[in-house]
Amino acid sequence: MDLHEYQARTLFERHGIPMPPAVLADTPEQAAHAARLLGSRVAVKAQVKTGGRGKAGGVKVVNGAEEAGSAASAMLGTRINTHVVSRVLVAQGEHVAAEYYSAVVLDRATRGYVALFCAAGGVDVEQAAHEHPDSFVRVGISPLVGIDEAKAQEIVTLAGLPPAEAAAIVPVLMALWETCRDEDATLVEVNPLATLTDGSVVALDAKITLDDNARYRHPEWEGFAENGPADPLEVRAAERGLHYVKLEGHIGVIGNGAGLVMATLDSVAYAGAPYGLAPANFLDIGGGASASVMHDGLEIVLADPSVRSILVNVFGGITACDEVAAGVLSAVDALGAVASKPIVVRLAGNAFTAGRRILKEAGRANIIFVDAMDDAAKQAVTLARSELARMAGSGGTAYNGSAVRDLIARSSGSGTTSAAGTQQE
């Protein structure tokens, strides 16, 4: 579960990580009032769960209540990387001498954690990571030891910080680890972590991802639930016990197991990139999905009006492929006209032969069986292109490049390129 900055701040404060005073605001009037309380110079920051706020206009340093209200008015109701800004955080302005990037991240490959640190933080840190990856210090962290004083000193020494700055940052790095450990987080990130002109260190941002598997240990997490409206398809999926995430593309994806679904998303994104096409969702039906679960999953994906084709990719283990095939047919029969969109099915593993026979004998013209995952992704992309072309009245003419991106934007009403948006996420 990703937290908003204002939510992450509460956990930072619990562990003694210094941050500037701040006030949450829902309206321009509240933002202006917050500026009066905090002083003449404040930062107005959009509260969205996505990166790149600063470059997208979601962070403004202003002077006075009037400017704070105007900045909030310009942000509220807008979108940053598809996320609607419904709140802003007004934080006291600080006199910054230097900015750093710091994070503690779960590393599943080593069954431990990794501390990341860069002496050049701020809005251009992503560019620095791309152009100068060696500028980032990467240190493995044992979950049994964590970041003690010696490990924190190792990190700042590798980063080449002057002694005075290093001494001030060491306790903050130790507190970041405590936050990660005690709050069951998979990511704790500060960008920027700043040294002020008076020599003190403060976190000017806060980003935390909590491990949903630890939710039973943290009843207080219920307070982090979204106040704004959630995507209705995500709500419906959650009510049925399905793991569904709405994306911005036009190709529905259903699979069993998060790893397989992620691989399928990558395959679809790669096949669709030349045409501006991308996955419309992430949907994991789980390891032991029955025909009814497959029915529910397909119903939810088909309810997305942006979906032009669907790819069902299942490896049969606990989930038997004949059950999957029965669920696909059940959904198609029950949903009627809405289920006439092309459905590409790739099955492998347990009861594969029986599943393929069930689909073949059903004789549904819109259900296409493909053996290999990459071939199935290409077929789903081809069918989505054909559907978009048909919608545009082209008589089946294939679109590509900027033409199809324009077509996608018109059909979704979003005015954005879905492929780029999905890959960014």
Image: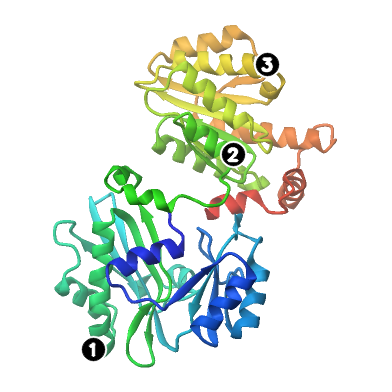
Q: Which residue is label 2 attached to? A: 232
Nearer-the-camera pick, 5 or 108:
5
Percent x, y for residue 320? 40, 17
Measure how far apart labels 3 and 2 are at the Cα level.
30 Å
Q: Out of 135 and 221, give the one closest to the viewer.
A: 221
Q: Amino acid at mark 1?
A: Pro
Query: Residue at 39% across / 67% down in the picture?
Result: 9
Which structural element holds mark 3? Answer: loop
- CB atoms of marks 3 and 2 within 8 Å: no
Q: Position of residue 342 (x, y in %)?
A: 66, 25
* 154 lies left or right of 328: left
Question: Does residue 139 appear anywhere in the picture?
Answer: no
The secondary structure type at the circle numbered 2 is: helix
Residue drawn at the location 29% of the way across and 45% of the way down: 214
How many other residues sit within 10 Å of disc 2, few (<14), some (14-19) or many (≥20)? few
Check disc 3 and give the amino acid type: Ala
SS class of the residue under badge 1? helix
Task: Please tell me the numbered disc located at residue 74.
Answer: none
At 50% from the left and 74% from the top, the residue drawn is: 123
Where does the image place residue 267, in percent across and percent down from the top left? 52, 40
Q: Residues within 10 Å of mark 3 (few under 14, many from 20)?
A: few
The disc placed on residue 365 is 3
Provide the residue designation for mark 1. Answer: 163
Q: Nearer the viewer, mark 3 or mark 2?
A: 2
Spatial separation of the CA atoms under disc 2 and disc 1: 53 Å
Q: Quadrant of residue 13?
A: bottom left
Dot 1, crowdedness within 10 Å: few (<14), some or many (≥20)? few
Q: Position of residue 271 (x, y in %)?
A: 58, 41
Q: Earlier in the sequence, mark 3 or mark 1?
A: 1
